[in-house]
Amino acid sequence: MRTLKLVVQYDGTDYVGWQRQPNGTSIQELIERAIEPIEGRQVTVVGAGRTDAGVHALGQVASVQLESSIDPAALARALNATLPEDVRVASVEEAATDFNARFSATGKVYAYRIWTGPFLPPFERRYFWHVPASLDVDRMREAGRALVGTHDFSAFRAAGSDATTSARTIRELQVEFEAERVIVTIAGDGFLRYMVRAIVGTLVEVGQGRRPVEGVAATLASRDRSQAGPTAPAKGLVLVRVKY
Amino acid sequence: MRTLKLVVQYDGTDYVGWQRQPNGTSIQELIERAIEPIEGRQVTVVGAGRTDAGVHALGQVASVQLESSIDPAALARALNATLPEDVRVASVEEAATDFNARFSATGKVYAYRIWTGPFLPPFERRYFWHVPASLDVDRMREAGRALVGTHDFSAFRAAGSDATTSARTIRELQVEFEAERVIVTIAGDGFLRYMVRAIVGTLVEVGQGRRPVEGVAATLASRDRSQAGPTAPAKGLVLVRVKY
């Protein structure tokens, strides 16, 4: 048995998310189904991050154990020949036998994309949250600083989430803007469900002046989801990179 | 009666093209239908360029004559509230009463986008032609120079096209590349049907070394469509700007 590491890109718009589930098509299922005729048996593909329905990936990482001796580059080509165009295998490489895309990961980088102009261009409609308002990026940056470090992020997690601990570490939080785009990039060792989207929903309220900059530290300390802003829509979120 | 000038952007993937036709939904029809409840009667919207099925626009221009006294910015907002997300009105302004988006146009700029990397990223899949090959951009540029100027472009027109004259003027033809993208930009006073796509299909063969650089001038002079390369797919083509 060999272990392969796949880097996967996808437009999540038309999928139920990374993880296999009964209510629709997942990215995991598509990749497993594409590998199975090559391997000649059922396989399980492990993803680094369980992106939710509608969330995109530029650098999702997946691992799979295969008996097939197919060349990694040939596997990438074969998968791209059968996968739908909104899911692409960017690369395949040999990995250590015990490599596991999920458990070996040491960090992830997400980007959240916001379009602030009066209308959302058609070409960006699937990849940006449209917030037609002027956002004060300096206020967003300042508020974001309170979130960097190791904290209990209960105030920014999905309601009813079942993760056993809600302590996570954010290594870096950047807010950049260029013309009508505001991009929030968050690097961390791991994320609770909806955590990035709840942070972005909160920072946008700060940027609009509807929430005080200094209030974000108090919201974090409250561990109370109802204190934070709304969960930003899935379509603005992209899993950019997984670190090992 | 007043005349309004609209700048329209669209992702043409799911449409039969700009012009109204019985076999599917056109951009023209969508915009007319969106204006009619505001104007209270049927209207005709004139587009500068009849983009074909699957072709996109960043700067299509349309004109319409209205009795309504609605403010231009309010009209843009109202249209964007009812149009589908893949069609956006970027701006509306008052124009001279005799302004006609089609007949007043003095030139158009099209861009054709080619992706040369081994796989087409999911986010670009609707907007690039995937040519997974190394393209010699210098050869493409040199070949393109033969096309600049006023010529009979019969060799680069749609088979069975019924334009009365096939003389057109290309003002500028640029081939740029950045990482895995090659963008061919063509500015001219007007274009025959499929002309840009036939030119791009030909230049790609030159870039791949499958057609001699100097052959393009002879192809142009032949006025014979069968001498030129294939018609590049619609999805790589964008109407960037219309000049008045």
Image (tube, coloured by chain):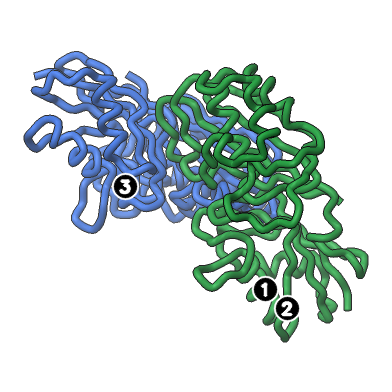
Chain colours: A blue, B green
Q: Which of the pair A230/B130 is nearer the observer?
A: B130
Q: Which residue is mark 2?
A: B43
Ranked by sequence position, the earlier of labels 1 and 2 is: 1
Label 3 and label 2 in one chain: no
Which residue is located at x 83 percent, y 60 percent?
B103
Label 2 secondary element: loop
**Residue A163 sits in which quadrant?**
top left
Q: Which of the pair A171/A38 is nearer the observer?
A: A38
The reply to whether callout 1 and callout 2 are in contact (CB within 8 Å) is yes
Q: CA distance from mark 1 to mark 2?
A: 6 Å
Q: Position of residue B239 (x, y in %)?
A: 68, 47
Graded by Cα atoms within 10 Å as few (under 14), some (14 to 19) or many (20 or more), the crowding at tag 2 reads: some
Chain assignment, label 3: A
Give the vertical position of A93 relative to B240 (above or below). Answer: above
Give the vertical position of A115 relative to A63 (above or below). Answer: below
Indicate left or right for A56 with A117 as reference. left
Chain assignment, label 2: B
**Residue A101 sits in which quadrant?**
top left
Give the vertical position of A69 relative to A116 (above or below). Answer: above
Residue type beneath disc 1: Glu
Label 3 secondary element: loop
Q: Which residue is mark 1?
A: B32
